[in-house]
Image (spheres, grey):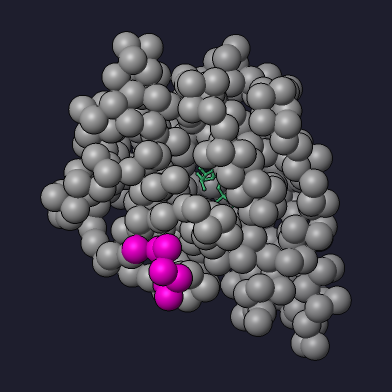
Amino acid sequence: MKILILGANGFIGNALVKNLLMDLRNEIYGLDLECSKLDHSIDNENFHFIDGDINISNEWIEYHIKKCDVIIPLVAIATPNVYVKNPLKIFQLDFEANLKIVKWVAKYNKRIIFPSTSEIYGMCEDKEFNEYTSKLILGPIHKNRWIYSCSKQLLDRVIIAHSERSNLTSTLFRPFNWIGPRLDSLEQARLGNGRVITIFINNLINNQDMVLVNGGLQSRSFTFLDDGIEALIKIIQADPEKLNGKIFNIGNPDGNLTIKELANTMVKIYNEISDKPYKGKVIEKSEADFYGKGYEDVPTRVPCNAEAKKHLEWIPKTNINKAIRITIESFLS
Ligand code: UGA
């Protein structure tokens, strides 16, 4: 199968490339701004990588959409601090640049596997979020945090509308707080542009205080990267028609922790692994002090996995403590 991965050097991209190359029948075409996370695959003869920008490399991208069987556009900024500080950057990259890709996929009637997001559900109050019945609840316009969710939601809607008109074949997947090696860099975390797990790892390594935003009672369902990639591979290998227009939550309900529980678990695991125990403290800050006034939080986020179980025969296997341990270890080494 010929597979085009835009954003091949990202957290999901690099792990997906590595996995797909295990099947010698796959030819992977990858584009990204750099290949720093692709050392494991860059010399593989079935991997064709170019340094490129989704905003600039138009000719290359359109040609490869025409040439490939499956298009997986993973380029996006996915860190809440940037949603708040630079919402127009999110609109341009996460929405406009990706809309262009969707239009080409429709023009050539190809298959797109699109990364939607758990953020889509916003402040939904369901106990478990369902792809087909849950309401998508976002906050007011001046809360910039929602521009990412809103951008992804509109792309989901455009893709599904194209699917319904048979302009393309699609499957949407929604990662729920995937964690694992090669997530955000520690430099991004230092600047506050990482996700909570990398920000906490950076705090632990540098003995800085770990901040619980609003007391840390909000929860997330943390999901190990390898489990998520397994689900993605199943989607890629499935009959495209059978999964056409379908949406899958890819998350681990058993990995649901409050951010306070996450912080305490991480301190405990870090102290077991590291030869120097953590000397910082776990402190609390308001969301306005930590992110600025454009922030609003998601109180709880638990995926319903019934769809993935039914159509992909997929369930997450990795215990949350093991996933956290592997993630911390990967950054320490
Ligand atoms: C994330 C991001 O939007 C995307 O990566 C993605 O689409 C989605 O959710 C996902 O991974 O499923 P969120 O879970 O809010 O959103 O992002 P984090 O930065 O990881 O924050 C998680 C929670 O930790 C938030 O409640 C935040 O307020 C809190 N937090 C973050 C802290 O308490 N302290 C910190 O130092 C950082």
Q: Quadrant of residue 242?
A: top right
- On whether residue 28 falls in the magenta region, the answer is no
The picture places residue 118, in percent across and down from the top left corner, at 56, 35
Residue at 45%, 70% (x, y): give it. 44
Q: Nearer the viewer, residue 27 or 126?
A: 27
- Which residue reaches farthest bottom? 275
Q: Can residue 275 be seen here? A: yes
Q: Nearer the viewer, residue 22 or 159?
A: 22
Q: Nearer the viewer, residue 162 or 179?
A: 162
The quarter of the rendered structure image containing the C terminus is bottom right
In the rendered image, the vertical position of residue 50 relative to residue 154, given as above or below: below
Residue 215: x percent and y percent? 69, 48
Indicate yes or no whether the magenta region holds residue 46: yes
Instruction: Report which quarter residue 195 is drawn in.
Output: bottom right
Q: Quadrant of the N terminus?
A: top left
Extent of the magenta region: 42-48
Query: For residue 324, which quarter of the picture?
Result: bottom right
Number of callouts:
0
Q: Residue at x 73, y 31 (%)?
A: 313
Task: Identify the residue shown where x is 44% and y is 36%.
Answer: 113
Q: Is residue 24 left or right of residue 306?
A: left
- The percent coordinates of residue 175 (x first, y second) are 57, 40
The image shows residue 330, relative to residue 75, as above or below, that is below
Rendering coords of residue 70 (x, y %): 40, 39
**In this picture, is 217 found above or below 146?**
below
Camera sees residue 189: no
Residue in view at x 61 percent, y 66 percent? 181
Instruction: Identify the main secondary structure in magenta.
Output: loop
